[in-house]
Amino acid sequence: MAYSDKVIDHYENPRNVGSYDKDDTTVGTGMVGAPACGDVMKLQIKVNKQGVIEDAKFKTYGCGSAIASSSLLTEWVKGKTLDEAREIKNTDIAEELELPPVKVHCSVLAEDAIKAAIEDYQGKN
Amino acid sequence: MSLDLTSNFFELFEIPVSFVIDAGLLMKRYRELQQTVHPDRFANATEQERRLSLQYATQINEALRILKDPLERARYLLQLKGVLWDDEQTTLSDPAFLMRQIELRESLEEVREKPDPLSAIGNIIDKVSVLIGDNTQVLQGLLESDNEDELIQAKNQVRKMQFLKKLMAEAESIEAAIEDDM
C-alpha cells in the first residue's frame, strides 16, 4: 500500500514526539489503543490558565499512518482552546493525510486520543 | 461424503464447543476429514462433486486455522455466543494496560543499547509470555460463561491479547535481528 507524501513526511520527521509528567495538573494525557492492529498512542496536552493548549506531545507505537495522525494532531491542537480541539474530527485528519480506507482507523485513534486527553485534563481541574 | 457447511467449526471437527481443546484430537479429526475430501478420491467424480470437495477442503483448512490458535479460537467462540467484532471502529481505553504496553515498547527500543542485548530481549519476551499466559487463563474462565457481563469482559480480554501478540511478534523479530548481528 502506498502512503501519501504527507504521511511519509510526518513519519520521517514526526513533530512533537515526547512526554510530559502525567501527574502535572496542567497536563492532560490520553492513552488509547487500536485492537485491530495493536497500535498504542499516548497524546499529551499542556494547557494554560485561559484553557488554551500551549503545547502537545505524543508517543505512538504503530504504523506510519498512526504516527502521522498523531503528529499532525499535535500540530493542529496547539493554540486551540479545549472546546476547539474537541471539535477536530477523524475525517479531517484522514482527509489531510489522504489516508486510504483501511487506515482510517488510525485517524479515529487520534481523535479518541485528544478527547481522552481533554477529559483527563478536565478531570484534574 | 457430505459435510454440512453451515455447521460451526467445532461441530465440523466433532469436538466440544469450548475454548479448552484437545490438540491431539483436533489434528486427528483434521486428518480424517482431509482424507474424506482428498482430490484423489474424486478423480472419477463429476465436475460438481470435485468442486464440492474443494469447497469442503477449504472449509476444513479454515476451521483448523481458527481452532488451533487460542486468540482466533476465542474470537470465534465469542462470535458463536453472539458477540460482534467491530475492530476497525473500536478504541481500547484502559490507561493502566496501555501505559504498561508503552513501557514495554520503550524497553524494546532501548534493548540494543544494553550491555547484553540478547539477555535483555529475552527478559522482555519472558515478561510478555507471562502476560499472555495470565490473559489466557482469565479468558478461559470467562469463556465458560454465557453471562453477558462476562462475555463483555472476555471480549475486552481478547482485545488485550491482540496487543500482547503484536508486542510479542515485535520482540521476537528484534531477538532474531540481534542473533543475526552476533
Image (spheres, grey):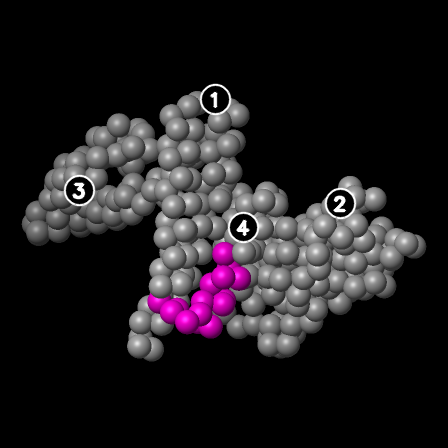
Task: Answer yes or no: are tags 3 and 2 on the same subunit.
Answer: no
Q: Which of A6 and A117 is in front in this view?
A: A117
Judged by depth in the image, the label closer to the viewer, 4 or 3, is 4
> Which residue is identified by label 1?
B147
> Which residue is identified by label 2?
A119
In the image, farthest residue toward the front: B115
> Which residue is identified by label 3?
B27
Question: For the residue labelled by badge 2, is the local secondary structure a helix, a strand or a loop?
Answer: helix
Dot 3, how many residues are within 10 Å of its Cα: few (below 14), some (14-19), or many (20+)? some
Instruction: Give the quadrant of the C terminus of chain B.
Output: bottom left
Residue interval drawn in magenta: B104-118
- The type of residue carrying mark 1 is Asn
Q: Locate residue B178: give its quadrant.
A: bottom left
C-alpha distance separating marks 1 and 3: 31 Å
Question: For the residue labelled by badge 1, is the local secondary structure a helix, a strand or a loop?
Answer: loop
Q: Would residue B74 be found to the left or right of residue B84 on screen? A: left
Chain letter of the residue carrying label 2: A
Chain letter of the residue carrying label 4: B
C-alpha distance separating marks 1 and 2: 32 Å
| Mark 4–mark 3 CB contact (< 8 Å) | no
- The type of residue carrying mark 4 is Arg
Task: Answer yes or no: are tags 4 and 2 on the same subunit.
Answer: no
> Which residue is identified by label 4?
B100
Q: Nearer the viewer, residue A98 or A49?
A: A49
Can the viewer see residue B98 in this picture? yes
